[in-house]
Amino acid sequence: MQMNILLVQPAGWSLPWLTAILRDAGLDAYRLEQVSNLPQAIERLVDHGADLVLLDRAAVEDAESALLRLQCIAPGTPVVPFATVGAETLLDRELVSRCIIRIWRASQDQRRLVHRATHDRLTGLANRWLLEEKVADAVARARRRGDPGALVFLDLDGFKAINDRYGHDAGDFVLKTIGDRLQRVVRESDTVARFGGDEFVVLLEEVRDERSAVRVARKLEAVIAEPVPLPHGPVVVRASTGLSLFPSQGTDLHDLVRRADRLMYHNKLSRRLDGTVA
């Protein structure tokens, strides 16, 4: 986790001073950025946000007005105004150090809570709630850009037999292994989610057409089918997949999953008739 600190100061005289404070506080993961004036600070906050803003009064004409604008732009982000004389920072070093440490700890706690609420405990993948938000954002982008996306629904075949034969610890290991493999296959802009039980969903943004999405689905099937090492010996798990395109075939998670699930069930049934699925 990285702490983001924004220094608003014309010449950045306080950068070495702040760097020393961060070093002494034991913070290794931080981003310290300096801008020269209020418009630059507002642009930076709108685009990237910050965990703490240090505002040199020399950077603005009216410190109180600037403080209010920054707090309106980034509500909840602490803004600490201070003064300088020449290159000397008139701000208590111990006070800044305590403030930074307190904000850092609070942001870590907040991020942990958010992660727990939006990710599956076992696999660390996105959960259904986060997936719903990701789908809404992806559909909106697809409409703006005119680039379709796809939702791939994956259901593991014969997973219950692994739990029955080797126990739930083995089943959990298989699920975590498959989740890791799926994340390695897709792009950083895509989302892998555990939908529930032995079902996974992969959200693909900016696919050229349905054939491109099908190729990705086949790649996902292939990586799932690689043997998973267990203490009793390797096991092979296969998956049945179905997909839907957005926004042409659905614009929310419910509709997209329903369509992909129907196609997945059809594919699973066809494989059973062919004798390729138990």
Image (cartoon, rainbow, N blue to C red):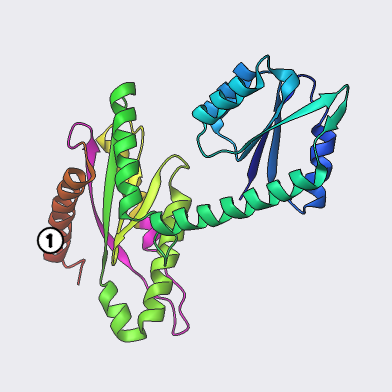
Does residue 42 lie above or below 138 as drawn? above
Residue 215 seen in the figure: no
State the image coordinates of residue 108 (x, y, percent, origin top left): 58, 54
Dot 1 alpha-carbon crowd within 10 angstroms: few under 14, some 14 to 19, many 20 or more? some
x, y percentage for residue 75? 50, 35
Q: Which residue is mark 1?
A: 269
| Residue 197 placement, left or right of 124 | left
Q: Name the outermost residue toward the front.
A: 64
At x 88% / y 21%, what residue is drawn? 86
The amino acid type found where label 1 is placed reads: Leu
Q: Is residue 60 magenta?
A: no
Residue depicted at x 17% and y 36%: 249
Magenta range is 222-250
Circle 1 sits in a helix, a strand or a loop, which is it? helix
Q: Is residue 234 magenta?
A: yes
Question: In the rendered view, would you say 190 is above or below 58?
Answer: below
Nearer to us in this view, 11 or 191: 11
Q: Nearer the viewer, residue 39 or 163?
A: 39
> Residue 83 appears at what percent x and percent y?
78, 27
Residue name at image x 61 percent, y 50 percent = 1
Q: Residue at x 39, y 46 (%)?
A: 191
* Numbered circles on residues, count: 1
For the question of whether residue 74 can be seen, the reply is yes
**223 with respect to 27 (left or right):** left
Instruction: From the top left corner, tell me how far across and down residue 237 is, in percent.
Output: 33, 68
Q: Quadrant of the C terminus?
A: bottom left
Quarter of the image for residue 267 reads bottom left
- Rendering quarter of residue 40: top right
Left or right for 35, reference 13: left
In this rendering, is residue 144 above or below 53?
Answer: above
